[in-house]
Amino acid sequence: MNIDFSLVLVILVGLSGLIWLLDVILLKPGRTAIGEEIRGSRANSRVGARHASPGAHGVDRVEQEVAQATREPVVVEYARAFFPVLVLVLVLRSFLFEPFQIPTGSMIPTLEIGDFILVNKYAYGLRLPVIGTKIMNVDDPQRGEVMVFIPPHEDQYYIKRVIGLPGDTVRYEDGVLSINREPVQIEPSGATTINSAFGPVPGTSYTEVIGGIEHTIQTKNQSLRNPARSMWVVPPGSYFMMGDNRDESSDSRIWGVVPEENIVGKAVAVWMHKDPGWNLPTFSRSHWIK
């Protein structure tokens, strides 16, 4: 089951804030009045008894009674304590940075399964939490950047590399990527092994440059590739996304382009890694994403 943490945070912020507000408006004045009534009645009792002296202990007992009578309910105490913390977390996650964990190998070798990444939520504009409505423009995605988004076919977070911008013509044929009829620059960097659905298969790593961003991709060896030829024209307000593990990635080649309103943010760094299972986290893979 997938949990929408932004929705959970919004609910918790609203609930804790509502409880605190209702207490301030409706309940706290009554408790304060009870406290004043206790002080007044004790003071009248002391006046009536002329020879009685309240002393320090008498005052302490009165204040203890007042404190007991005016004490906040536990639920209000927790709401007041957690509300500012929850608001801070909501603002940080919604408008600044949000952590994600990589669940699949579609971005290998750039991102490994188990990488914890940091996503810049304001890089492409500020959006309201949960509903995603943009409230302020900042910048547009650029070719070569790694982006988190919600694909058109599934209500899940995906992460891929921006390949095509609005108006671009993208072509992918037998492992060769072209944008607007210009082949993307690649250089072989060594042999590798790719974990496919049918087991490990031989492949090749390449250094690729898109939009001035140099990064590493991998493909299966030529005899294992699908030789089908495909071409796409990116419509306005949409982006064509591909994984760096080119032959093991479900991306825009399969389910289409990503509309602008589905953008979540720009992936900027790997800050921790944890292999699946009972393994301790490590910081050995910490790096800026390019």
Image (tube, rainbow, N blue to C red):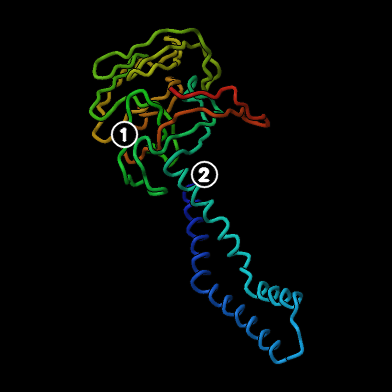
Name the secondary structure under disc 1.
loop
Q: CA distance from mark 2 to mark 1?
A: 29 Å
Q: Residue at x 32, y 44 (%)?
A: 134
**Relative depth, front residue between 205 and 225:** 205
* Dot 2 or dot 1, earlier in sequence: 2
Q: State left or right for residue 138 relative to residue 267.
A: left
**Quarter where residue 70 is shown:** bottom right
Q: Residue at x 42, y 28 (%)?
A: 250
Residue 170 locus on image (x, y percent): 28, 22
Does residue 71 lie above or below 128 as drawn? below
Mark 2 and mark 1 residues within 8 Å of each other at the beta carbon = no
Report if residue 8 is visible in the image. no
Does residue 75 lie above or below 45 as drawn? above
Name the secondary structure under disc 2.
loop
Residue labelled with disc 1: 139
Q: Residue at x 34, y 14 (%)?
A: 176
Q: Amino acid at mark 2?
A: Asn
Residue labelled with disc 2: 2
Q: Which of the labelled discs sits on residue 48, or is there none? A: none
Residue 132 locus on image (x, y percent): 37, 46
